[in-house]
Amino acid sequence: MTKTPTEVIFLWHMHQPCYKDPQTGVYLLPWVRLHGVKDYYGMAAILDKFDKVKATFNFSGILLAQLLEYANGQAQDYYAKLSLKNPADLSARERKFIVDRFFSVNYERGIRFNKRYLQLYRKKQGKNKKFSNQELGDLQAIFNLSWFHPYSLKKDKNLKLLLAKGCGYKQQDKKYIIDAQYRIISKTIPLYRRLLKEKRIELSVTPYSHPIMPLVCDTDIVREFSYLNVPRLRFSHPEDCVWHLDKACDIFSEVFGYSPEGSWPSEGSVSEEVVKIYAKQGFKWIGTDEGILFKSLTSEFVPYDLIKDQRHIIYRPYNFRGMNIFFRDRNLSDAISFIYQGWEDSAFAANDLLEHFKRTHYYTKNLLKHRAITIIMDGENAWEYYKNGGIDFLKAVYSGLERSDILCSSTPSEFLSREKAKPLQRLSPGSWINSDFGVWVGSRDNNRNWQALKRVRDLIEHMPEDEKTKQKLLGYFYILEGSDWNWWNTFEDVAGDFEKIFFSYIKKIYKILGKKPPSYIM
């Protein structure tokens, strides 16, 4: 058993919710564009430099749809429009919006070491908050410049010069910056296609609008968790889960030319019913959190604490009713997501991770013939907290894997080609957070949303026969099933942007139906 290396499976999950205003078609928030410029391009570009390293990139269907619109020049977002507007022509409201929102970057990595950005930031914090036209113009430019991946700045000498310029930005400078962002996004999907063709990556998909599928199947599953409040009105539409998977696969096939074999369910949320749906739709593998495995193996005879102490059990896939399931190493995945970002020495942080990989190898090499350390995490949000955008850290990790005699990288499908999954008798429901669904259900605001979904769905189902209108309404409704609206009820949505988008789709549906929305719909 000692002859086989321990395989590391990286699954970088990429997702943004639907930011499009249903009334105007304008994207209200810029995060698909900005993360597209920095992370969706950058993560593939870093991997491209390591011929022997493999990884899996997972996209939600709704993100792919929005990326396509940006790549084809069909998407406009409010932030980009404001960025291009001459400061002299800005209204008082627009000026305030720019000052309030265009510092939305990590202070330590994005603002502190940029002399002009820091100067503008301190002015915002001070008593004199009145920005001149030139100060606003600089803020428009620097905010957008701060989202470029370092590789893009290195390749484009004009961008590099604009960053070095520091202040005194003109209208043509801002136009070049925004145009460059669109050019990078247009090159991103072809980059993934090439890496796929070269068999250096695997691509997988998350259900279209990123729904918490066990809750969409039946909110009564919350009764499994005695400490969570069950929504007063039961929502149960398992057929919607099929739609979200099919829609995501359709877009995936349109973009990449084939059907995906694997999926990271939204937030790693699973249940036995959801796995059944995945199997029926032809998927070969999914991923979720190690806590789900521990709970699934717990019984009246074998306590949870005893199970979780046997960590070698997470380093292989399991098969539940025909579906192969990988369970992520929570400790190491979360360390990359939340811990190593605070380490100033990127090489030291990377070496610490590699040492954990090595210790796992020596711990498991005589227990399992083939072993997989599964790292599953958000592939976009963590890196803005890292020094140099995470490049130094990732390069050191990838380089260490390439040089190692006892470690290598792999993908889920590749691993399954040489190791049969172990049968699993039951699957406990839950997500990657606390092995339950408490982030998306149980609170007053989140249960209110589920009850609103129930009422809206009933109205759609009982509307007069008009199939074209019904499908249009359902298209809006499926967006409402996304997880992000409730996530930001739990994790403070300071500006109220996500609640605004959520309610805008409800209001759109009521308007089409010719009905007045409930009073709590703002």
Image (cartoon, rainbow, N blue to C red):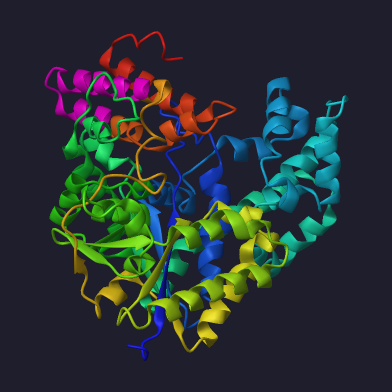
Q: Is residue 280 above or below residue 367?
A: above
- Residue 206 locus on image (x, y percent): 33, 51
- Residue 232 locus on image (x, y percent): 27, 18
Q: Nearer the viewer, residue 434 or 121?
A: 434
Name which residue lies at 65% across and 60% down.
389
Magenta stretch: includes residue 194: no
- Residue 254 locus on image (x, y percent): 30, 58
Q: Is residue 317 above or below residue 95?
A: below
- Residue 429 locus on image (x, y percent): 26, 45
Q: Which segment did they paint magenta?
A: 447-474
Q: Name the chief secondary structure element in magenta.
A: helix
What number of labels is visible?
0
Q: Nearer the viewer, residue 446 or 319?
A: 319
Name which residue lies at 79% across and 43% down.
138
Where is residue 326, by image quadrant?
Answer: bottom left
Q: Nearer the viewer, residue 316 or 483?
A: 316
Magenta stretch: includes residue 463: yes
Q: Is residue 440 left or right of residue 500?
A: left
Q: Is residue 103 visible?
A: yes
